[in-house]
Amino acid sequence: MKEICLNTRDSFCRILVGESFKNVGEYHPGKKLVIITDENVYRHYGAFLPEGLLITIKPGESSKTLSIASDIYGQLITNEIDRNSFILGVGGGIVCDLAGYIASTYLRGLSFGFVSTTLLSQVDASIGGKNGVNYEGYKNMVGVIRQPEFVICDPEMLTTLPREEYHMGFAEVIKYGAIVNKELFDLLEKDHKKALDGEEKTLEEIISICVEAKCRIVETDEKESGERKKLNFGHTFAHAFEKITGIPHGEAVSIGMVLAAGISAKLGLIGSQDVYRLRDLIEKYHLPVTYPHAFDDVFEVMKRDKKRDGDSIGLILLDKIGEAVIHDIDLDMLKNWIDDMR
Ligand SMILES: NC(=O)c1ccc[n+]([C@@H]2O[C@H](COP(=O)([O-])OP(=O)(O)OC[C@H]3O[C@@H](n4cnc5c(N)ncnc54)[C@H](O)[C@@H]3O)[C@@H](O)[C@H]2O)c1
Ligand SMILES: [Zn+2]
C-alpha cells in the first residue's frame, strides 16, 4: 500500500493506493455514515459495505444532476443526518462527483471520503477536490472545490470493471505520462501487457504515479488558474467530439491527445517520431487514434470552449514527452489545421 498526501492551503487529504476497500471502516472513526453508491457497484460490493444509511443511484451521467442531489438532500433530512455524520462515496467518477457535491453543500459541508472504483476515478476524478453536477446537458456546470478526507484506490476492484471502461481509464493514465512523467510513459510502453491484464503490482505502481502527479499539480494550483490546466491535454478536442457525437470520454481524449501532439509537431515543439510514439502507445491500450466522423462542426464547438480568450484559444501542447506547455493558438490558424484534418 502507498499513502500519498494532498496538502492544500486549508485541507489535507490522504490517498491510499493499494489499500483494501474492506478496511474503509478504519478511516471515518466514530461518525454516523451515509454511503452513496450506484447499482452496478452495489451489485459487486454491496455485501462488503460498512453499516450506515445506504443511498443507491442509477449508473450514468443522468444521475449527476441537481434533481438527484435534491432527492438525496431529502433522504438526509428524513434520516436526521447531522453535522456529525460522514458521507462516503463508493463508485466511479459519477458517484464521487455527486457524493462530494452533496457532502460539500448539505448543512454547509460535512466531511467525506471516497472508495474510488474505476481506473478513471482512481487516477483522476476522485483526486483533486472538484465536486459537481451537470445542468441541463451542460457537464459539470455547478460545483465546488473541496477536498475529501481520504480516497481509497483498491486496484482489486478494477477486476469487475467492464473491459471498455478499464481501457478508457488508460487514456487519462497515458495523459499523465505525456504531460508530466516520461518514466510513466516508458513504463506504460514496456509493461502494457501486465497493465492490461490488471497485474496488481504494476497497476498499483501506475496508479500511484498518476495520483502523485495530480496531487503535486493540484497543490500548486488548486483553483486551475495555470498549472492545473495542463491536465486538459487532449481535452479541448475531446469535449468537442463528445458534444458532437456522444463518443465516450476516454476515446475522445485519446484522439484529442494525438491531434494535440500533431499540432505540437507542426509548431516544431516535438518531432513526428514523438507523435507516432504517443499514437502507438494509445493503440496498445485498445483506444482509438483517429476521429471516425466528419470534422465539420469541430471548429465551431471548440470556439465556444472555456479556454478561448478573444481571437485565440489556450491549447495544451507537448514540449517533449513528459512535459506540457500551454500555447495561445490563433483561432484562424486552428481553423486551417482542422480544415486540413478533414
Ligand atoms: N472531479 C473531477 O476532477 C473529474 C475528473 C474526470 C472525470 N470526472 C467525471 O467522472 C465521470 C466519469 O467517471 P467514470 O468513468 O468513473 O464513470 P462511472 O462512474 O459512470 O463508472 C463507469 C461504469 O462502471 C460501473 N462501475 C464502477 N465501478 C465499478 C466496478 N469496480 N466494477 C464494476 N462496475 C463498476 C459504473 O456503475 C458505471 O456503469 C464523469 O461524470 C466526469 O465528468 C470528474
Ligand atoms: Zn478526462
Image (cartoon, grey):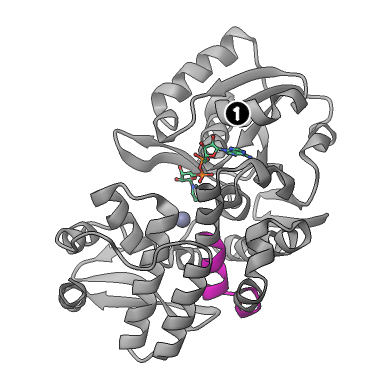
Q: Amino acid at mark 1?
A: Thr
Q: Report whether 250 appears left or right of 204.
A: left
Q: Position of residue 312 (x, y in %)?
A: 23, 72
Could one spot residue 154 in this view of the protein? no
Q: Position of residue 115 (x, y in %)?
A: 68, 39
In the rendered image, the quadrant that contains the C terminus is bottom left
Question: Which residue is depicted at the point 58% across and 23% down?
Answer: 107
| Magenta stretch: helix, strand or loop mostly | helix
Q: Report whether 305 appears left or right of 175.
A: left
Question: Which residue is depicted at the point 60% across and 62% down?
Answer: 214
| Residue 184, quarter of the rendered image | bottom right
- Can residue 181 be found in the magenta stretch? yes
Question: Which residue is depicted at the point 36% across and 86% down?
Answer: 265
> Looking at the image, how many numbered discs can be counted on the residues?
1
Q: Which residues are magenta?
A: 172-184
In the rendered image, the quadrant that contains the N terminus is bottom right
Question: Which residue is depicted at the point 57% across and 12% down?
Answer: 77
In this view, the residue in front, 170 or 194, is 194
Task: Return the residue at label 1.
Answer: 37
In this view, the residue in front, 330 or 196, is 196
Q: Position of residue 256 (x, y in %)?
A: 36, 66
Q: Report whether 171 appears left or right of 14.
A: left
**Under tag 1, what secondary structure?**
strand
Q: Position of residue 208 (x, y in %)?
A: 71, 61
**Badge 1: few (under 14), some or many (20 or more) residues near its Cα, within 10 Å?**
many
| Residue 190, quarter of the rendered image | bottom right
